[in-house]
Image (cartoon, helix red, strand yellow):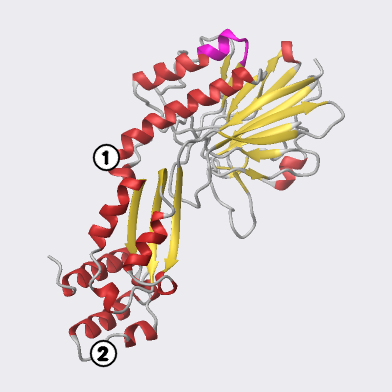
Amino acid sequence: MAGLRLLHTADVHLGAAFGFLGRRGREQRDQLKATFSRVIDLAITSQVDALLVAGDLFDSAYPQPALVGEVMYQLQRLDSEGIWTLIAPGTHDRLQPGGVYESDELTKLAHVHVFRDREMTARSISGLDLDVYGMAVDREGKDVLSGFRAGDAARWRVGILHASFILPGKVERDEMLVSAESVAGSNLHYLALGHWHTQGDYSRNNTPAFYSGSPEPLDIGSGEEGRVLMVELEEGSPARVKPISVGRRRMSRLELDVSGIGGPTELYAYLRRMADRDLVLEVRLKGIWGDDWAVCDWDRLEDELAPLFFQLHLVISPAGITAQDVDTYPERTVMGRFVRIAREEMEGKEGEELLVAEEAFRLGLTHLAGRP
């Protein structure tokens, strides 16, 4: 064969709860299944040689039987086309007694292999002249590729891992790690990585190493589309790695200083222009000081806009109160005194304590503005 074509995905998280989406969580769980089906469609129509799943195909080691049945159905579609599926258990669907990967349910398909070993081992696919190396997540907390080097027996050598890439000063600890040095010395033609939910290129020297990101967004971020990676290997040429959007929804967090927008009417218009029924949008609002904002019915504003989005949440962010904001309300007024006390309470707080203080501030503003 002239080359090799692979489809790389990871962190599908089938069965994820999506508690932050409330009643719409079930819709997003269903969307994960629909998007995974789209990934299978892409693998078939693109005539790939193998699908690589770099961990967390399921959100749990013990998924519901119906969910396992859905995955079986999808992998059977690939199996009937002679397309291989190679799976590395991740941190969520790790190897557990009685877990989904401890049984032979998935691997009874001729073209499915699950890496169950706790060290890098090869699955040779003679028809493709391919060795795929992978391992299950272990709790080692060290560079799992340290000292590893793929053999030269097969024409193509591919790795699959669910691990964090060591970034000195930023990422130095996790259950599974890989380093720039170990990737560079791995002798692999491609390393498929999972665990980080956004697509990224961590290639070193002549070894292409990529995170595919999740095919469907899993949490609120910067609004990235869910993607997979199409990988084409050809002798004598660098690997061609092409991101392909497959996700339906986007999840975005926006910090907005409304002091430059105007009042509540202008804010409505601003957000109205962003309307998208497949967008989960969290808007953290700053600069909401003055009489117009003091009497704003925030719940009503959110309710009016919410049907235009998959989910919309407006968050008043008093953490950014400035001296000028405080001066908007005279100190001897009830509102002025409340704002000053709130500012003092939030100074120095972070994490959960800051969130509690911010919610208390929001409720206080609501009450003082005369709302029930």
The residue depicted at 59 percent of the width and 53 percent of the height is 172
- Quadrant containing the C terminus is bottom left
With 368 as the anchor, is 196 left or right in this view?
right
Of residue 367 and residue 178, the one placed in the foreground of this image is: 367
Q: Position of residue 72 (x, y in %)?
A: 46, 15
Q: Which residue is mark 1?
A: 23
Of residue 5 and residue 289, the one placed in the foreground of this image is: 289
Q: Secondary structure at mark 2?
A: loop
Q: Which residue is mark 2?
A: 330
Residue 66 within the segment the image draws in magenta: no
The residue depicted at 60 percent of the width and 17 percent of the height is 44
Residue segment shown in magenta: 76-83
Q: Position of residue 25 (x, y in %)?
A: 32, 38
Is there any visible trace of residue 360 in the rendered image? yes
Of residue 109 and residue 99, the one placed in the foreground of this image is: 109
Query: Going by the picture, which residue comes out furthest to the right?
Result: 236
> Rounded to the nearest whole Å, what is the CA distance between mark 1 and mark 2?
42 Å
Residue 78 within the segment the image draws in magenta: yes
Q: Amino acid at mark 1?
A: Arg
Q: Earlier in the sequence, mark 1 or mark 2?
A: 1
Q: Position of residue 199 (x, y in %)?
A: 60, 43
The residue depicted at 42 percent of the width and 22 percent of the height is 100
Answer few, some or many: residues within 10 Å of disc 1's Cα (few below 14, many 20 plus, some between 14 and 19).
Answer: few
Q: Position of residue 103 (x, y in %)?
A: 44, 16
In the depicted structure, whether residue 168 falls above or below residue 258? above
Q: Amino acid at mark 2?
A: Pro
Q: Quarter-wise, where is residue 3 in the image?
A: top right
Q: Secondary structure at mark 1?
A: helix
In the depicted structure, whether residue 368 falls above or below residue 191? below
Query: Of helix, strand and loop, which mostly describes the magenta segment?
Result: helix
Is there any visible trace of residue 15 in the rendered image? no
